[in-house]
Every structure is written in C-alpha cells, then in structure tokens.
C-alpha cells in the first residue's frame, strides 16, 4: 500500500457505489415514469375535451349564431343550443365552464364579448346572479394576454389546449373557432375542465413510484452486498491478509524455511480462487528463485577470486575472458558445441575523447557496458580492449540471441534519435554474433574471428548508411 494515502475498503466502495446507483436509478426512473404518466393523463383529457367541443359545435348553427351576435337578440335556435349546452354541462360534472366568446380587442378592459354560456340548472333558473348573456362585455375578467390568445384561436385552425390558473384552482382549457357557412370565424368555443386534482394525483403517483423503486433498490442492494461479501470482498480480504503477512515475513529474509505462504481458505469457485492458487504458485517460484540466487551468489564468490574486474566499468576484463575461454574449450572438448560469442566495438571513442575529453569518453564506455549487461542479463560480458567488448552467450541469451541483438540495435537507434541526450551519451556500436559450427570452426579462435568479421561488416554498413 502506498504510504500517505488513506486505504479505501472495497466493501465500502461497493456499498457507496450501489447506493449512488440506486438513488440515480430512482430519480431517472421516477422522472421517466412521471413524464409518461403525465403525458398519458393530459392526452386522455385532450381527447375528452375534444369530444365535448365537437359535440357542442355540431349543435351550433354558425349562420344563426352570427346573426344573433350582430343583432344582440337570441333566436329560437340560439335558445335550443343553450338548452343543449346546459344539459351537457349538467351531464359532465367536472366541466367548469362551457362557453363561446368573441374577442374584441387587446385592451386591458372591455376586450371580450360573451356569445354563449352554458349554466347548470340551479345557476340558470334559481341563483342567476353572475350568469353571462349574449352581448355581455367583460370588464377585468380577461387580461390583454388572454384576449390576444383568443384572437389567435379565432384566426387559427383546430383545437388549442392550455392551462390557466384561476382563483378556484387550475383549469385545462380546450378552445376552437366557430365558423359560419362561408368558413369565416365568428366566435371561439371553449370548455374549461378542473384539473386541480390531477396535479395532486400526479404527485401521489410520483411518491408511490419513488417508494416502490426505492424499496426494490434497497432489497437489491442488500442481496447484492450479501453476495459480493461472500464471493468477492471477504475472499479478497483473506487473500490480502495472507499476502501482507507473507510480505512482512519475507522482507529481507534469507532463510528459505521462513519463505512460506499461508494460503487462505477460499471456497468460491471463481477468479479469486484462481488468483489465490496463482499467488501460491508464485511464492513457490519465488522460493526457488531465491534459492537459485543464493546458489548463484556462492558460485559468483568463488569465481570472483579467479576473475578480475575492469576498473572503469566493473565488468570482467581480458584476464577473466581468457580464463572463460579455457572453460569453454573444455566444454567444446567434451562435445558441447552450444557456444556463441557476441563481439561489440564502440564507435567514435577517439572522437569523443578528442572533442569532449577522456571523462566523457569514459562515460560512453560505461554506458555501453551497462546496456550490454542489461540486455544480455544471463551471460558474462567482458571488456577486452579500450573500445571492444565480448559477450559469451549462455542459457536464454543463447536461445534468444537474435531477439536480443534486435533489442540492442533498437536501443542504439533510440539513443541516436533522442535530442535530449548529449553527444557523449549517444552510444554507437557495431555487433557481430557467431555460433560455433564444426564445419567452419576448428577452435574458439576461429569462432571469435567470425564474430569479429561480422562486427566489422556491420561497422561498414553503418558508415555507408551515414554517408547516405
């Protein structure tokens, strides 16, 4: 765990994530359902209002109504129409008003004239105060904005729906033009439906909907957290405790018996169990690796007494190389021909020394040495001259020699193209590789000559490329 950073338990992160997900889901689903439900309710009322308007318009004689408007007198047909509209409003109890008006102007007062006004039986014949009659001119009942809207409906086509706040609540209004036989608009027929209860119904629906979604989400969170605890967080916690314990015990430990991993008991048959098994195998491999390192260190200590190190680079020198050749010759005498050499020659060493000084030349030599040791990590590297190196290919390096040569040349290319490097930091070198071939080589010296020849061929190619 990175020091200075607060640990975030996985179980808490999952819980918080689930809660945020459910809250978001509740909001989105509630808004979507509420929008759909509201649209459905309003569409239903629009159909309801349209039926009332069409039924009313079918019983209005436009030409007769036009004459009544012009003369201000009620005709027999006009009175029959009033009786029909009265019966209609008595039949549909949720109708606030059913009426026809004629907008006169868009002034603040006196802007609308009453043409038809349906009344319930009590209002028509008992309590007649407030009834509207043909020719009545409004005072402040209609504002200029409403009058302008009535003009739009009068001059428009089809039914227009809108809401209007009144002192008694909220009305949903549908209005359409009334025309005479010539098609000229003579009045606006409108019906006002009380929808105050619709809003409370929609709010109630919204709360019920949110409650259901939240309850379902809570149940889901509970079940999911139980499942995730059993199958994810608890097994991971066990694995973490075992891994941390192993790391604490093994830090700086050289006792192989102490490098033991206590595998947790994980019963889930999923990736976490596979991960636990992989960690167990990895720790076993680490134990073997440490054992190999200790063994290699012991061998290195023995060899160090025989070999000398190059003072500048720290790698083996010409003396160590000669000793290694004797051991290779012994292998060759026993029939082991899996021997390979890589001869490397550093370019521009003299130019670097002359231009930037020997200290910079030494840096160039050291950088090439480090690069060779990094790439050929499983093979001994020797500095056998001022600018000449040899790698005796062994093990994986021998097997993957071609790939390693490509990597070496790729690294040189990167350094050459890196504008941030100083000239003495850009290593340029030629490498030749040769593998012992009984048909071509009589001894290790001929093997070295073939590798050296290949190196010089590479150097020629590099010079030719620079000239191009």
Image (cartoon, rainbow, N blue to C red):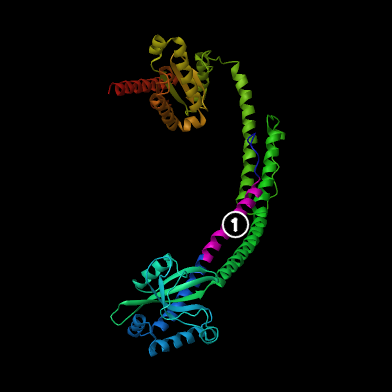
- Seen at 52% across and 27% down, the residue is 377
* Above or below, 451 relative to 223: above
Number of marks drawn: 1
Q: Position of residue 195 (x, y in %)?
A: 53, 72
Q: Which image quarter is the N terminus in?
A: top right
Magenta stretch, overall SS: helix
Disc 1 secondary structure class: helix
Task: Quadrant for residue 281, please give it.
Answer: top right
Q: Residues within 10 Å of mark 1 (few under 14, many from 20)?
A: some
Answer with left or right where residue 323 lies relative to residue 231: left
Residue 15 in magenta? yes
Residue 327 shows in the view:
yes
Which one is nearer the viewer's eye here, 325 or 283?
A: 283
> Which residue is disc 1 drawn over?
23
Q: Position of residue 171 (x, y in %)?
A: 50, 72
* Above or below, 99 relative to 234: below
Task: Quadrant for residue 360, please give it.
Answer: top left
Q: Position of residue 425 (x, y in %)?
A: 44, 19
Which one is nearer the viewer's eye here, 300 or 237?
A: 237
- Seen at 51% across and 13% down, the residue is 312
- In magenta, the rendered stretch is 9-34
Residue 437 shows in the view:
no
Residue 232 in magenta? no
Q: Which image quarter is the C terminus in?
A: top left
Q: Position of residue 43 (x, y in %)?
A: 46, 73
Answer with left or right where residue 334 lies relative to residue 151: right
- Seen at 44% across and 86% down, the residue is 82
- Seen at 63% across and 64% down, the residue is 211
């Amino acid at each position: 765990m990175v020091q200075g950073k607060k640990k975030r338990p996985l179980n808490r992160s999952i819980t918080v994530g689930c809660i945020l997900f459910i809250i978001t889901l509740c909001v989105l689903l509630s808004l979507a359902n509420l929008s759909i439900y509201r649209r459905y309710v309003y569409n239903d009322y629009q159909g309801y209002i349209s039926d009332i308007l069409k039924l009313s318009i079918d019983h209005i004689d436009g030409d007769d109504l036009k004459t009544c408007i012009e003369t201000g007198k009620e005709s027999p047909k006009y009175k029959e129409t009033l009786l029909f509209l009265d019966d209609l409003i008595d039949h549909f109890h949720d109708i606030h008003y059913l009426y026809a008006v004629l907008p006169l102007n868009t002034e603040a007062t006196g802007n609308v004239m009453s043409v038809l006004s349906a009344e319930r039986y009590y209002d028509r014949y008992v309590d007649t105060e407030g009834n509207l009659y043909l020719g009545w001119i409004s005072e402040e009942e209609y504002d200029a904005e409403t009058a302008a809207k009535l003009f739009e409906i009068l001059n428009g086509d089809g039914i227009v729906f809108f809401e209007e706040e009144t002192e008694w609540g909220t009305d949903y209004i549908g209005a359409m033009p009334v025309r005479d036989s010539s098609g000229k608009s003579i009045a606006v027929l409108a019906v006002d439906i009380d929808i105050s209860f619709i809003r409370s119904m929609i709010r109630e629906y919204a709360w019920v909907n949110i409650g259901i979604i939240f309850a379902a989400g809570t149940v889901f969170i509970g079940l999911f957290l139980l499942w995730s605890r059993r199958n994810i967080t608890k097994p991971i916690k066990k694995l973490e405790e075992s891994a941390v314990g192993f790391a604490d015990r093994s830090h700086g430990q050289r006792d192989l018996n102490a490098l033991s991993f206590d595998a947790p008991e994980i019963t889930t048959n999923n990736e976490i169990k596979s991960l636990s098994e992989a960690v167990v195998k990895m720790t076993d491999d680490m134990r073997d690796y440490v054992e190999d390192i200790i063994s290699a260190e012991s061998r290195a200590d023995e060899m160090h007494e025989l070999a000398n190190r190059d003072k500048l680079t720290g790698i083996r020198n010409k003396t160590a190389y000669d000793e290694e050749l004797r051991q290779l010759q012994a292998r060759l005498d026993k029939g082991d021909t899996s021997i390979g050499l890589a001869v490397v020659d550093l370019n521009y060493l003299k130019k670097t020394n002359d231009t930037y000084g020997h200290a910079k030349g030494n840096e160039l030599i050291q950088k090439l040495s480090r690069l060779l040791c990094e790439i050929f990590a499983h093979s001994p590297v020797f500095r056998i001259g001022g600018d000449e190196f040899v790698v005796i290919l062994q093990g994986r390096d021998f097997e993957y020699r071609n790939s390693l040569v490509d990597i070496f040349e790729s690294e040189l290319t990167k350094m050459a193209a890196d504008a941030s490097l100083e000239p003495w930091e850009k290593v340029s070198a030629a490498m030749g590789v040769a593998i012992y071939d009984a048909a071509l080589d009589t001894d290790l010296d001929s093997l070295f000559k073939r590798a050296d020849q290949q190196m010089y061929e590479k150097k020629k190619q590099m010079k030719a490329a620079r000239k191009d």
